[in-house]
Each structure stands twice: as C-alpha cells, then as structure tokens.
Amino acid sequence: MVKENLETVRKTIPSGVLLVAVSKTKPAEDVQEAYDAGQRVFGENHALEMRDKHEVLPKDIDWHFIGHLQTNKIKYIIEYVRLIHSIDTFNLLQAVNKEAAKHQRVVDCLLQFHIAEEETKFGLSIDEAEEILNSAEYKAMNNVRVCGVMGMATNTDDMNRVRKEFHQLKEIFASLKSRYFADSEWFKEISMGMSHDYPVAIEEGSTIVRVGSKIFGERVYN
C-alpha cells in the first residue's frame, strides 16, 4: 500500500513544496518501497534509527532529522544528514556546528519555534531566536547554515486554531528573513504540516511538509 498511498499524497502537494516521507518506526523495507516509487526524501526522529536505515538503504536518499535531537546523538547522523529541522536551543546549534566541522561539512538547519498551545512541544521563542542570531558565537559559525524555520501546530481537529498557528510561523519567518537574512537566498524554508494538517500548512505558506501515517500507515511503537 505504500506506493499507492504515496501517489495519493503526491497529487495533493503543489510543485515547490517538498514532501518529506516520515518513516520513523517503520522498517527499512517500507522505506525501500517508497524509494522504488520515486521518493528520495525521508524523515526520522531518532538518530540511531536513522543511522541503521542509512546503512542498509540507497545512499542517494536525503535524510531529514525532524525530532528532538540530543547533542550526544549528533555524531550518528552528521556525516550524511541533509537537513536538521529541529534546532530548538543555542546549545544544540553549537554542538551541530562542532560535529559538522569534524567532517568538513556545512549542515543545513531550521530553527524550531514553539507555536502550539501544548506545553509538550519543543521550540524557541522569537526572543530566544534573536538572541542566537545576534550573538557573536553564531556569527562565527562556519559549519551550519540556517535555512528557515520549523514548527508543529497543536494536535487538534480545530483547523482554525491550526491555521492561526501556521500563520504565526509564517510571520516569524518573514520577520527573521527581513531582519537577518535579507541577502541570503538559502533562507527560504518553512517546515510545517503533517499528515492531518498539511493541506492547511500549504495554504499558509509551507515549503516542506512532513507526512508519515498517510504514506506508511499508523506509527508502530515498541
């Protein structure tokens, strides 16, 4: 069913919006099936699981890390990760920069913002993000590139509330773009929208959607 599900989802995503197939908790065989159907971008939220899949799957896959990243796990993904969506502290950005330097890489990252009303979600406030971007330490970093923003809306069926939160993230992106990245063509990504709300996210300006259960089925928990 993975191929059929993937084709159905693709029909709902306009050109210019990147589909990240969220394969967390799913076996490598399912990822391979999506790969065989033409998908090349996959998202994981556990570093060791990403490492294990990277070892056995085709090497032209673009791996996106979309979950809460612990600093002691960065080393398992830093050699090949295409984009880290979830930079939610200055300490994490510094640690990614340090590990990337060991491999002579510049790793693309997104700043994750707390836009939901749920306390369980991770993310920066606008004040915390500005503190990072204004700091001398950030300006001296040579091995990370901030390419945009990411956020997760409240897990609710109230799409008006979800839309409001996505709109808030778009406004945060616009503010940071004008104030810190006006001349940076790479600062262009807004990662928002998952299986249950990505159509609303696209309407509100998302450039990257993270879709899992609509492609692979419901998540499997051990």
Image (cartoon, rainbow, N blue to C red):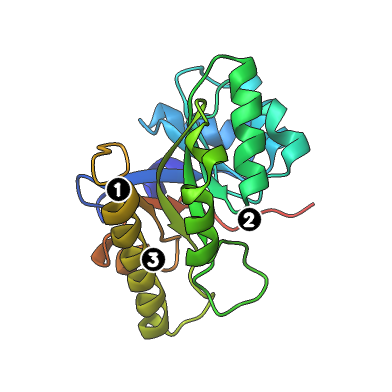
Residue at (46%, 44%) from the top-left corner?
21
| Residue 135 as seen in the image, left or right of residue 17 | right
Of pointers 2 and 1, the one earlier in the residue sequence: 1
Q: Quadrant of residue 103?
A: top right
User: What residue is shown with label 1?
Assistant: 10
User: What residue is shown with label 3?
Assistant: 169
How many numbered markers are drawn? 3
Of pointers 1 and 3, the one earlier in the residue sequence: 1
In front of the other: label 2 or label 3? Answer: 3
At mark 1, the secondary structure is: helix
Amino acid type indicated by mark 2 = Arg
Residue 206 position in % (x across, y down): 31, 57
In front of the other: label 1 or label 3? Answer: 3
Residue 189 in view in this figure = yes
| Residue 99 as seen in the image, left or right of residue 3 | right
Categorize mark 2 by other alpha carbons within 10 Å: few (<14), some (14-19), many (20+): few
Question: In this view of the protein, which residue sits in the foreground, 32 or 179?
Answer: 179
